[in-house]
Image: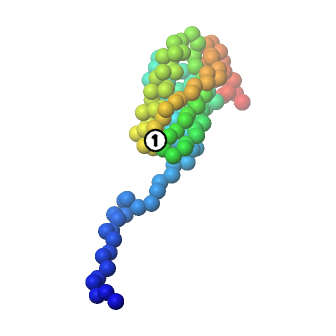
């Protein structure tokens, strides 16, 4: 038998042990909130910028540390739809990278509904009456 002491492996700090998994639905909430923030800062953000039936909705698929995002929006018409979508994409990517530490290679946007100032206020009034 050898009398040399066995070397003990170096201790791993607690912060470096284990794994963190962020659920897809949590990343989807981050994306929806980021879309809401992006639209709230724009002049034609309208009802889509508030919580409720017209609020942005997101679905996310996470594989490793890569999030693929799809955001559904209701936007004002007439307005610059392309600029609004670009602002949403930028903010969604920024927030998910900041909050979840995930790469976001794509943000698909579905414009589900367009509303004018007249129909937007009528729809809001109808929702309050229900």
Q: Residue 72 location, x and y as percent? A: 60, 28
Residue that mark 1 sits on: 102
Q: Colour scheme in the image?
A: rainbow
Q: Residue at left 54%, top 15%?
A: 81
- The quadrant the N terminus occupies is bottom left
Q: Residue at x 55, y 34 (%)?
A: 69
Horizontal arrangement in the rendering, residue 3 relative to residue 53 (left or right): left
What percent of the width, then of the height, locates residue 84? Answer: 50, 19
Q: Circle 1 sits in a helix, a strand or a loop, which is it?
A: loop
Q: Quadrant location of residue 10?
A: bottom left
* Quarter of the rendering containing residue 130: top right
Q: Position of residue 92 (x, y in %)?
A: 48, 32
At a point 35% along the width and 65% down the height, the residue shown is 12
5 vs 37, nearest the viewer:
5
What residue is at 43 percent from the left and 38 percent from the top?
Answer: 97
Q: Furthest-left residue in view?
A: 4
> Viewer-proximal residue, 32 or 123?
32
In front: 15, or 30?
A: 15
């Amino acid at each position: 038998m050898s009398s040399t002491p066995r070397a003990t492996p170096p201790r791993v700090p607690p912060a470096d042990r284990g794994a963190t998994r962020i659920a897809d639905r949590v990343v989807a909430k981050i994306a929806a909130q980021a879309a809401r923030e992006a639209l709230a800062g724009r002049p034609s953000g309208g009802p889509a910028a508030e919580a409720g039936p017209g609020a942005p909705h997101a679905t996310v698929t996470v594989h490793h540390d890569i999030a693929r995002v799809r955001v559904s929006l209701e936007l004002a018409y007439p307005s610059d739809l392309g600029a609004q979508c670009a602002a949403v994409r930028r903010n969604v990517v920024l927030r998910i990278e900041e909050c979840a530490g995930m790469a976001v290679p794509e943000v698909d946007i579905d414009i589900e509904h367009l509303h004018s100032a007249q129909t937007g206020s009528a729809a809001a009034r109808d929702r309050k009456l229900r």
